[in-house]
Amino acid sequence: MTYLWLKWAHILSAAVLFGTGLGIAWFKYRADRSSDLAMIAGMSRLTVMADWLFTTPAVIVQFVTGVWLAALRGLGLTEGWVLAALVLYFVAGACWIPAVVLQIRMRDIAQRCLRTGAPLPPEYLRYRRVWTLLGWPAFGAILVIVYLMIFKPAL
């Protein structure tokens, strides 16, 4: 029964991680493309909040339940698809952590501009470009991890 509950938590956290990542990217993209500074500032604030409330716990639950499930199944962490999934997990994390830092900076810049009436500075646009570039490999890694979890290919 422990295995099934862990599997449930693992699958649920994968769905939260995937859905939150996709949702954040979509809504931030749409807000940033608007000319509405209030929308940009609000969505930047919500992006940071969503990462702390949903993504961060899902990242932790993914790792803990994944390692635990592998141990219950007798799978070594250096075996085939498990190792590939772990490497991709850390690739995604290596992209996500700086992306969160950039989100916080963009939120602060947008809030400051909203308060002062100033336009978004080039710094915000630079952060947005890097944030977007970091998102592609992180999201791709998550997609491949989900594939590996489902198909468990021999590697």
Image: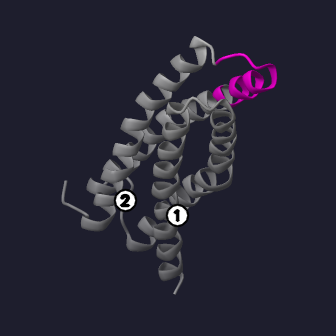
**77 to 68, vertically: above or below:** above
Q: Is residue 86 above or below residue 116?
A: below
Residue occupied by mark 2: 76
**Residue at the image point whose x is 49% and y is 67% from the top:** 10
Tell me the residue at 48%/79% (across/down).
3
Residue type indicated by callout 2: Gly
Residue farthest along the right direction in this orientation: 115
Residue 76: quadrant of the picture: bottom left
Q: Is residue 129 above or below residue 59?
A: above
Q: Nearer the viewer, residue 17 or 148?
A: 17
Residue 145 visible in this rendered orientation of the protein? yes
Q: What label does residue 104 carry, if any?
A: none
Q: Are marks 1 and 2 in contact (CB under 8 Å)?
A: no
Residue tagged 1: 13
The part of the chain drawn in magenta is 106-119
User: Is disc 1 placed on a helix, strand or loop?
Assistant: helix
Instruction: Give the image location of residue 64, x and y in percent.
Output: 55, 60
Q: Tell me if residue 78 can be seen.
A: no
The spot of residue 77 in percent (x, y) is 39, 55
